[in-house]
Image (cartoon, rainbow, N blue to C red):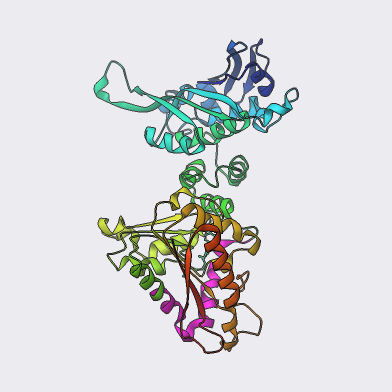
Amino acid sequence: MLLTITNTNPPATDLGYLLHKNPARLQSFELSFGKAHVFYPKASEQECTAALLLDVDPVELVRNRRGPSGEGGMLEQYVNDRPYVASSFMSVAIARVFASALSGGSKHRPELVSTPLPLAAGIAVLPCRGGEDFLRRLFEPLGYQVVADRYPLDEKFPEWGEGPYYKVEIAKHVTLQELLTHLYVLIPVLDTNKHYWVGKDEVEKLLRHGEGWLQAHPEREAIVSRYLRGFRSLTREALARLTEDESVDPDAEQETKEEQEHAIEASLRLHDARLQQVVAELKAHGAKRVLDLGCGEGKLIRELLKDKQFEHVLGMDVSYRSLEVAAERLHLETMPPKQRERVQLIQGSLMYRDKRLEGFDAAAVVEVVEHLDEPRLAAFERVLFEFARPRIIVLTTPNFEYNVKFETLPAGQFRHRDHRFEWTRDQFQNWAGVMCERFGYTVEIKGAGEEDQKVGAPTQMGVFSR
Ligand code: SAH
């Protein structure tokens, strides 16, 4: 099992300082499952390659019950691909042998630690469950050039087809720490087989190593779920924490949310009226591919799917549990295939730029902004108006002035305890105006729900277009 790392930035042998391994020496390390050796097949001014060779001892694996199938697999315990492929063993070796490089330290070249270098990593055999396509979807969004060569299952018997094994090279201008981190996380994600028990500390490890890149990765969900071997509660926790907004537990918040707010607004059947109005606006503007941002339990999605004009609806929410409820309420699992293709639910936060939100012609953001911390609203504004940038945006938020009309609501309070703010009509209009100026939209401000002469409608709605 061989991993090589090549630097072509002269003096290329600085790689030795970054890895804390002298290019002139062969070094060996004892690991619980075998040995790791570090050596440099090439070490010149122009090009320097460090190799990490892992010699996994299959007998040791069985003895420690770390092999596939534990005690039960008999022959498979001794005859398997583990000694020959890059897997979680490789990640462990990276963490042990290149510990300081992985955590971003260098005694002799501290300034190089944060300098992107032209680096390439070669993996002799990488099992890619999900194929080359998935391999590319993991590394390309991170900016890597990927070269993948698939091994035939057996050269003598081409009719057996191809196996899941690839020779892979990835290259990028990147810091060594980032490169090692990406390999550390993504090798076991491709292999999907971990040699050790996955517990809660794996969530911590993943979040630590995922800092700064995993949050915005388009394959975030697959990465988290595979890294945690599909354990749903761990996956849910990791995804929630990855996208959480400060200390809020989005699931807990969501549960009480609907009840509280609906109790207050109930007499007006405000929620339904609001959704109908949003649908009407989207329809009138000829929207076909629609985003429902902060889709909650999917009520708007259900309405949109009733109308054939809406060809595709993507619902996104930060709360994984809400999405599970939405999937259930929409009967996604039993939907006829054609209908099923029209709808997609994804977990994500509106605080982070997300490529999955691009290419839609409309977005609905219904009763969501008031849940975002005001200082962080700026991030949301760019995510929506600058990056997702749909032609039409229909955004609703409570009208604070109207709250005096709710008998059960004490004066000065918001409609829900998770609301971070509620805007007066002036405040909303000002904010909408600033958005238009900054991002090149025009807006039409409307109300939803029955309008009061003095305080206006219970819900404010901005229909932005460009
Ligand atoms: N639009 C839905 C739900 C509104 S409740 C409806 O009208 O019924 C607000 C929703 O925004 C919740 O589901 C909450 O989980 C979601 N939310 C809060 N912060 C978010 C964020 N940063 N990114 C995405 N969704 C968020």
Q: Main secondary structure of the magenta part?
A: helix
**How many discs appear?**
0
Judge whether residue 65 can be spotted in this image.
no
Q: At x 44% / y 50%, what residue is drawn? A: 356
Q: Please say if 175 is above or below 428.
A: above
Question: Which x, y percent locates residue 59?
Answer: 51, 22
Q: What's the magenta region?
A: 248-276
Displayed quadrant of residue 74:
top left
Judge whether residue 190 can be spotted in this image.
yes
Q: Please say if 64 is above or below 155.
A: below
Q: At x 68% / y 15%, what residue is drawn? A: 22
Displayed quadrant of residue 168:
top left
Q: Is residue 267 magenta?
A: yes
- Single out the residue that lies furthest toward the right: 107
Q: At x 45% / y 60%, what residue is drawn? A: 323
Q: Is residue 177 magenta?
A: no
Quarter of the image containing the C terminus? bottom left
Question: Which x, y percent locates residue 427?
Answer: 60, 73
Q: Nearer the viewer, residue 390 or 239?
A: 390
Q: Nearer the viewer, residue 304 or 284?
A: 284
Question: Which x, y percent locates residue 83?
Answer: 48, 22
Question: Which x, y percent locates residue 103?
Answer: 67, 33
Q: At x 53% / y 69%, what residue is drawn? A: 255
Q: Please say if 452 is above or below 438.
A: below
